[in-house]
Image (cartoon, grey):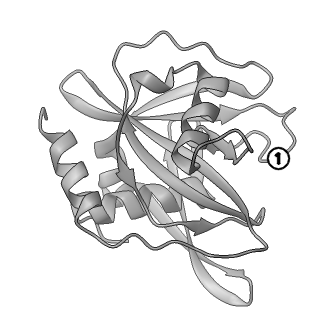
Amino acid sequence: MADFRELIKSKLTTRQRVAIADIDGTPAGVLIPLFAKGGKVHVLLTLRTNTVASHKGQISFPGGGFEAGDADICATALRETFEEVGIEPASVEVLGELDDVMAVSNHVVTPVVGVIPFPYRYKISTEEIEEVIEVPLEFFMDTRNCRIEQRSYRGKEVPVYFYQYGKHNVWGLTAYILREFLEICYGVEK
């Protein structure tokens, strides 16, 4: 448990990350916030409000679009996380990045993996976030908790992953990023 940081950092830094160079896509960064709670690794997810411009009422990682003042896409993910849930960028131990993913919103999303302290006093932006959800990572590691459907995207059939965690349905890009993270860092097959 204590060495989960080193395991993840090692897996992410010893592989070749795949970047998408899509000049038409809008760069975005999300943070996969991990923390130790009760002897287990957890991941923080957010439930978006029904009043935000996009992805209304969906489960997501904190994050958003790159802005001119951001030093890089990691800074974007950290800034957005602070804006949405109040986690200070200096409180995040960044472990690495996953491959870029093209979202249906035409964003080129870079997932940044980081560790946050626990407990943490979140300051939730009620305009954007309805709820913060803390899920044990082992829930997502158990492939029995994952349902896969084939859907058409940009003329190709692609797998879409779904997890039902209590009343929360984690699916789409968030579930895809979780699967990629688990495959790279823990060997859980997609």
- At which x and y percent is residue 71? 59, 43
Left or right of residue 38, residue 121 in this image: right
Quick one: SS at disc 1? loop
The one nearer the camera, 182 or 109, is 109
- At which x and y percent is residue 165? 49, 41
Residue 159 visible in the displayed image: yes
Residue 61 visible in the displayed image: no
Q: Which residue corresponds to the image point at 18% horizontal and 41% vertical from the top-left? A: 4
Q: Residues within 10 Å of mark 1 (few under 14, many from 20)?
A: few
- At which x and y percent is residue 13? 26, 59
Q: Which residue corresponds to the image point at 28% horizontal and 44% vertical from the top-left? A: 138
Q: Is residue 121 above or below residue 21?
A: above
Q: Is residue 37 above or below residue 97?
A: above
Q: Is residue 181 above or below residue 160?
A: above
Left or right of residue 136, residue 162 in this image: right
The one nearer the camera, 30 or 27, is 27
Residue occupied by mark 1: 54
Q: Which residue corresponds to the image point at 54% horizontal and 14% vertical from the top-left? A: 122
Name the quarter where the C terminus is drawn.
Answer: bottom left
Q: Is residue 11 above or below residue 74?
A: below
- At which x and y percent is residue 121? 48, 9
Name the quarter where the N terminus is drawn.
Answer: top left
Query: In the rendered image, which quarter is residue 34 located in?
Result: top left
- For the view shown, which residue lies furthest in the top direction? 121
Amino acid type at mark 1:
Ser
Query: In the rendered image, which quarter is residue 50 located in?
Result: top right
The one nearer the camera, 96 or 52, is 96
Left or right of residue 72, residue 130 in this image: right
Q: How many marks?
A: 1
Left or right of residue 183, residue 18 in this image: right
The one nearer the camera, 151 or 127, is 127
Q: Which residue corresponds to the image point at 76% horizontal and 66% vertical from the top-left? A: 106
